[in-house]
Image (cartoon, coloured by chain):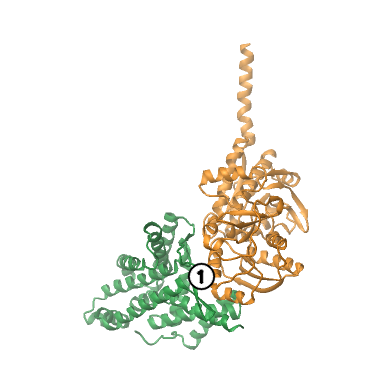
């Protein structure tokens, strides 16, 4: 009897470390930790931190290597090469910005390292047929189409004006918006690109105002969104709807500017009140831990890390098998159903349904599509 | 082109240009007296912006009122910088001076990043987005107030430089450092004074722009470039030139944005800049020294 117990104990004792050893998996994470986009990058870092904790609870130990690309493509590329050759990671989550992600994506097949892009929007990233590049979030075209679809349920807008920053994210989002608007028969009356961080948009905005558009579509990171809306109010620009393409229009800082953020609609990859499994719980735990509400970037990064680490650990860190695992797998988590499919010219792209949120009473409320909506949209727009 | 749109562009261009001028004046005074190009100018402005931000959030001091506190503090800050660092390299090679001022700027911006993180700080006042209408042209209240304060400071500075003994001594130092010294002017003290004034101007510009812009540690670099263009355009060392340069840049940016496109405004600004330098290499007011 005693020997039996001892033997069992021995077997268990031997088995335990080997189990955790098999589950220890090396993952790289490229993000913008410093630099101009750092405030959004912080959300991604927090999302990944939570994913690592949750993975641990599931018995998956992640050996995470974090790299900061400061928002510059060449640094992102260098970070990726380091992860691929020196750190021998099984897969990479990131980078955050479109410019960085498209630079890294172009090298993924060369190093045969699977990368999972969590939140970059530029369409090209998954349009070039790269075998090792996967994307969780919806690409740029959906940012605008979902917004216009939402407005179409309320009204028949005739004209639209675009104002956007001259970055990869800004131009690719607006280019697809233009195509979609043309198909819907909405006429373009202004097309204004601007240099990120400019202090004065008043003249541009008054030019747009003189065209009296039904819709104003804006794309910008973080604080330009606030400057744009402040000066729109000054100038008295009042279209039927202000549409913000994700990013700067979905941050807590934007929300905090009550005077100017009210009734602005923005497209987003995720909201905390959507009924995807674990979304609400994620928001609650995140807010408790970081004392801030999560943006969609946090949710995207969390889910991307969960998927990458689980797949890599299942395939014991083998890059090719991990790539195949991502390709054939199916998940259902805080980002809803995830599957990396080939469609409409995309490769390994998750056909993610985007949501439209509107600021109502100093809160982001989901207003579209109807099956995820929590509040009715307020239309047309009015200054407070 | 709609006439009211053009008028709107001209009005907001001049108002924004006023604040640009203030940044340029600071840089030009420093250059005039010491022949040192201060590449940390934008970062000094950033220090002023953070000062304004914390005065507002911690003590509730209105950004425009806080100029009264920011200005003397920034003067002191600049004077110390000059006494401790800049003074040592006054006679050395220009590239060494540039390296020192760039280095000081880097230390300032990275210290700010360590202390306050890279988060954007947004100063929200009750009037951050308020405006009033005259003949269909909307005028931003905070911008108008900052323009008026800028004008008052500039006039005050003229008076100081033209009428007071100290002001004349500063101008004498700017004209000929050695001759001034022979006339019994304490040029070292004048250098400290002018770097202090220059920094106070930059800090004040930072305070004035805070209610409508945002604050982060790297905010300075964009304004350093702008200040440099303004100063060179107006003529290095000329205060009238810097005032003119600032308003021209603000105006051109704004008008180019409506007549051509906001994407092309920098191209227009730099084309005009090059054109002026081709025709008058010393800048608009290059020859005349205040």
Is residue A203 found left or right of B31 in the rendered image? right
Q: Residue at x 31, y 69 (%)?
A: B87
**Chain A as rendered: colour:** orange
Q: Is residue A329 above or below residue B62?
A: above
**Residue extending furthest toward the left:** B184
- Judge whether residue A124 can be spotted in this image: no
Output the chain of dot 1: A
Where in the figure is residue A279, as x and y percent of width and height? 63, 45
Give neighbour class at mark 1: few <14, some 14-19, many 20+ (Cα, 10 Å). some
In the image, taking residue B93 as reference, residue A77 lies left or right, namely: right
Q: Residue at x 53, y 67 (%)?
A: A230
In percent of width and height, residue B177 lies at: 29, 80
Q: Colour of chain B?
A: green
* x and y, in percent, of residue A224 in the image: 55, 65
Would you name the residue on which mark 1 appears?
Answer: A199
In depth, the one of A193 and A122 nearer the eye is: A193
How many tags in the picture? 1
Quarter of the image where one finds residue A124: bottom right
Closer to the camera in the image, A119 or B10: B10
Q: Position of residue B184 (x, y in %)?
A: 21, 80
């Amino acid at each position: 009897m005693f020997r039996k117990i001892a033997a069992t104990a021995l077997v268990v004792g031997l088995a335990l470390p080997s189990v955790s050893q098999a589950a220890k998996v090396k993952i790289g994470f490229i993000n913008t930790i410093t630099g101009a986009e750092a405030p959004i990058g912080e959300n991604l870092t927090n999302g990944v931190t939570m994913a690592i904790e949750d993975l641990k609870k599931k018995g998956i130990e992640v050996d995470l290597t974090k790299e900061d690309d400061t928002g510059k493509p060449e640094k992102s590329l260098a970070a990726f090469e380091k992860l691929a050759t020196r750190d021998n990671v099984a897969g990479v989550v990131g980078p955050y910005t479109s410019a960085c992600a498209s630079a890294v994506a172009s090298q993924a097949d060369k190093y045969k390292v699977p990368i999972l892009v969590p939140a970059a929007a530029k369409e090209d990233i998954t349009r070039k047929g790269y075998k090792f590049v996967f994307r969780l979030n919806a690409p740029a075209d959906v940012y605008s189409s979902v917004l216009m679809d939402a407005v179409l349920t309320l009204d028949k807008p005739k004209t639209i004006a675009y104002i956007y920053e001259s970055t990869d994210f800004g131009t690719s989002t607006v280019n697809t918006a233009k195509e979609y608007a043309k198909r819907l028969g909405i006429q373009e009356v202004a097309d204004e690109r601007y240099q990120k961080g400019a202090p004065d948009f008043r003249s541009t905005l008054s030019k747009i105002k003189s065209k009296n558009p039904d819709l104003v579509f804006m794309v910008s990171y973080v604080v330009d969104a606030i400057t744009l809306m402040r000066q729109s109010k000054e100038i008295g620009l009042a279209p039927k709807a202000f549409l913000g393409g994700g990013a700067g229009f979905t941050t807590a800082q934007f929300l905090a500017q009550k005077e100017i953020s009210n009734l602005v609609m923005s497209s987003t990859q995720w909201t905390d009140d959507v009924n995807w499994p674990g979304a609400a719980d994620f928001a609650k735990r995140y807010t408790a831990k970081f004392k801030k509400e999560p943006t969609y970037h946090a949710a995207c990064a969390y889910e991307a890390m969960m998927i990458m680490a689980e797949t890599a650990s299942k395939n014991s860190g083998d890059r090719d098998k991990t790539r195949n695992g991502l390709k054939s797998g199916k998940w259902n988590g805080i980002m809803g159903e995830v599957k990396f499919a080939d469609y409409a010219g995309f490769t390994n792209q998750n056909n993610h349904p985007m949501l439209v949120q509107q600021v109502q009473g100093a809160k982001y409320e989901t207003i579209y599509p109807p099956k995820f909506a929590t509040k009715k949209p307020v239309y047309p727009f009015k200054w407070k | 082109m709609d006439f009211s749109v053009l008028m709107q562009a001209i009005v907001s261009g001049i108002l924004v240009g006023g604040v640009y001028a203030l940044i340029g004046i600071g840089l030009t005074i420093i250059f005039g007296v010491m022949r040192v190009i201060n590449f940390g100018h934008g970062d000094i402005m950033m220090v002023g912006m953070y000062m304004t931000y914390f005065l507002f959030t911690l003590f509730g001091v209105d950004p425009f009122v806080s100029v009264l506190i920011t200005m003397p503090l920034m003067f002191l800050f600049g004077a110390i910088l000059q006494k401790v660092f800049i003074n040592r390299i006054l006679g050395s090679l220009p590239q060494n001076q540039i390296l020192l001022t760039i280095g000081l700027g880097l230390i300032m911006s990275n210290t700010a990043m360590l202390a306050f993180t890279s988060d954007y700080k947004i100063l929200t006042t009750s009037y951050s987005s308020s405006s009033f209408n005259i003949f269909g042209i909307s005028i931003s209240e905070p911008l108008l107030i900052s323009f008026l304060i800028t004008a008052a400071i500039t006039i005050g500075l003229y008076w100081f430089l033209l009428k007071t003994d100290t002001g004349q001594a500063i101008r004498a130092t700017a004209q000929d450092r050695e001759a001034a010294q022979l006339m019994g002017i304490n040029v070292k003290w004048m250098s400290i004074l002018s770097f202090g004034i220059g920094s106070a101007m930059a800090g004040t510009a930072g305070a004035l722009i805070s209610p409508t812009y945002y604050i982060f540690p790297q905010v300075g670099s964009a304004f350093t470039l702008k200040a440099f263009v303004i100063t060179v355009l107006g003529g290095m060392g000329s205060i009238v030139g810097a005032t003119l340069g600032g308003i021209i840049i603000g105006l051109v940016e704004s008008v180019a944005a409506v007549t051509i496109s906001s994407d092309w405004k920098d191209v227009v600004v730099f084309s005009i800049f090059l054109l002026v330098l081709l025709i008058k290499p010393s800048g608009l007011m290059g020859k005349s020294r205040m």
